[in-house]
Each structure stands twice: as structure tokens, then as C-alpha cells.
Amino acid sequence: MSTTRNPRTPDAPSAVPQARGGGDTRAGRRVRQVRELGILLALVLLIAVTTAVNPGFLAAQSVRDLLLGATLLTILAVGQSLVLITRNVDLSVGSVMGLSAFAVGTLFVAFPGLPAPVVALAGVAVGTVCGVVNGVLVAAARVPALVVTLGTLYMFRGIDFWWASGRQINAADMPDGFLGLGRVTLLGVPLPAVVALLVVLAAGWYLRNYRSGRELYAVGSEPQAARLSGIPVDRRVFVPFVVNGALAGLAGVLYAARFGTLDATVGTGMELEVVAAAVVGGVAIFGGSGTVYGAALGALLLSTIDAALPMLRVDSFWQQAVVGLLILVSIGLDRLLAVRTARRLRGGGSRGA
């Protein structure tokens, strides 16, 4: 009995099932390392050029601002990567982040004595509920993720506007201890950046070392084959949406702590930037390949571009054009690698016959 194999499957770490053993896994690992190394080199080159033009780019305050700027995008890109790997997408993350942030501010206004950790957990819970809504509609109702999350993008944003009713919550409405989270450092690294790093490491560990994590790649590579091999596909699709919602809620909490000014427009347009970070980082838009480490590098690269191009006196229009070009190059590179891998697999099959 032969099993149809998606060309992108070898890019997943220890994807299930593995018909050709360790050779494909090693090839996939090399492809993944080359992608992430390319992003890292582009990042280093951009920093070097910007520093040569403006030495202040690597000043302590600039680096701190850069890390803080990349924090939210990194957390959101990790959650989006989990969804993309299963061959789905979540376009509602910006709205979920905004709704969670406003929920945090509203709780502080309504219950001034409420401990900050309780409010933070409530913000994450709001995001989790939104993720459950998306997950149920996609995994249980079998509605395409693009349609579902496009609808919930507007639904969650509408709820946010209805809740806010034109109000704005300011830093004066929130306790200093909570707002201080954005200024606390650990060994010189801003605490929100440390949180983002822990999220990346935890997600990467899960994908690599847990069977359910590796099965996400199998689901994204070939859902029907994954279902026939006994993988609970619907459950595997549902969980990433819930985790993505929880991470969007966490991003909303960190946004509230850092900026302190909240209204119904928080997170507007963020969803496209998040998808861009994941795709630029090597997570295939068609599912089945990519890592959260690459997505984090993609988020850091996009954040660095946002910070560097104004210093290079590049017009804001070209900033968006550069991001768009990076997305097109990433998708083109993904297709090229998929075709080359497919040819390699066909060649291997002929020799083995």
C-alpha cells in the first residue's frame, strides 16, 4: 500500500508518517536551517547597514525599543504559525488582541483594587474564548478558516466598538504596578521580551518533542492521509486556534501594560502583519512546514525594518513595499523548495524500485 506524500512534508521535523525514514527528515532539517539562516543573515545585514549610516541605531535605548516593538508581533506570530502549520489561517488576531486589551483596561476601571495578575488572566481568558469560537467553527462545523476568521475579525472588532462606545482608557486608570511591567528588565532585557522568548521556546519544544505537536505537520501536509492514519484531525485543528486566541489575549495584556492608552482601534490591521511575519519566517502558507523559531525571526526582521528604514530616510511607502516583496519572495522560495524536494523524492523512489 502506497501513501501519497505532500512535497512539503519533509520540511516538518519528524513528520508523521515517515515513509522514507531519516533521509527525508535530515533533508527537511537542512532546508529549514537554510531558511532560518537566510533570515538571520538578512537581519544582521540590515542592522549593519543601518548602524553604519546611523551609529545610534544600536544604542541601548534603541535596542530596548526594538525588542519591545517586536514583542507583540513575535507572540502573535507564534500562535499564527501553529494555525498555519495545520493548513489554516486566523485573520482575527488583531481584533482579539484589541478586545483583550480593552477588557483589561475596563476591569481596572470597574474594580480598581483587583490584583494585576487576576486582570492579566482575565485578558488571556477573553482571547481564549475568542479562539474557542474560531476553533469550533473551523474544526467542528468544517467552515473554511479564511471565511470564519474574516467574519470573527469584524465580529470581535464590532464587540470592541460597542463595548468602548467611543470611550478611551488612559494610563491614569490603571495601577502603576501593572504599567511598570513594560519598563521592568531582566538582565537588561525588557520583561515583555523575556515573555515572548519563553513563548517561542515553549511552542518550539512542544512541536518538536510531543507527538501531538508533530501531528500538526502531518495534518497540514495531507489532512486525508493524517485522518486515515488515525490522527484526530479535528482536535488537532481545534487546539491551535485556542492557543492562538490565548496568545492574542496575552499580547493584549502586554499592550495595555506598555502603552496604557486603550480604545476600540487597538490591533487594527495587525493580522496582516502577523501573517507576514510567519510567512517571511518560513512557515508555509499552505501548511505542513515551518517553525516558530523562523516565525520569531520573521517578526524580529519586520520590526527591525520598521525601525531601520526611517533612519535610512526611506519613505514609509517603501517600508510597506519591502514587506510585500519579502512575502512574495518567501512564498516563491517555499514553492521552489517544494518542487525540488518533490523531484528528489521521485528520484529516490525510482532508485529504490
Image (cartoon, rainbow, N blue to C red):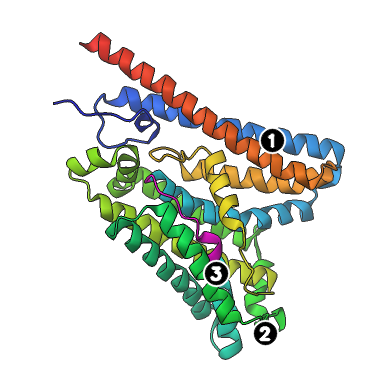
Q: Which residue is mark 1?
A: 44
Q: Residues within 10 Å of mark 2 (few under 14, many from 20)?
A: some
Indicate the position of residue 96 as horizontal and vertical percent values. Answer: 51, 66
Mark sitting on residue 157:
3
Q: Amino acid at mark 1?
A: Val
Give the image quarter of residue 220. top left
Indicate the position of residue 48 as horizontal and vertical percent values. Answer: 76, 35
Q: Is residue 119 above or below residue 212?
A: below
Residue at screen point 49% across, 51% down: 78
Mark sitting on residue 136:
none
Give the image quarter of residue 104. bottom right
Work out whether residue 13 or residue 219 is closer to the camera in this orientation and state it.
219
Please indicate whether residue 163 sits to the left or right of residue 132 in the image.
right
Identify the image quadrant of the C terminus.
Answer: top left
Work out whether residue 53 or residue 109 is closer to the camera in this orientation and state it.
109
Indicate the position of residue 290 as horizontal and vertical percent values. Answer: 45, 39
> Quick check: marks 1 and 2 in contact, CB under 8 Å?
no
Q: Which residue is mark 2?
A: 173
Please indicate whether residue 290 sits to the left or right of residue 57 in the image.
left
Per the image, label 3 sits on a secondary structure element best described as helix
Q: Is residue 281 above or below residue 165?
A: above
Q: Which residues are magenta?
A: 86-96
Q: Amino acid at mark 2?
A: Asp
Question: Of callouts 1 and 2, which one flags the residue occurring earlier in the amino acid sequence?
Answer: 1
Per the image, label 1 sits on a secondary structure element best described as helix
Marks 1/2: CA–CA distance: 41 Å
Per the image, label 2 sits on a secondary structure element best described as helix
Q: Is residue 119 visible?
A: yes
Residue at screen point 38% across, 44% down: 87
Indicate the position of residue 165 as horizontal and vertical percent values. Answer: 62, 82
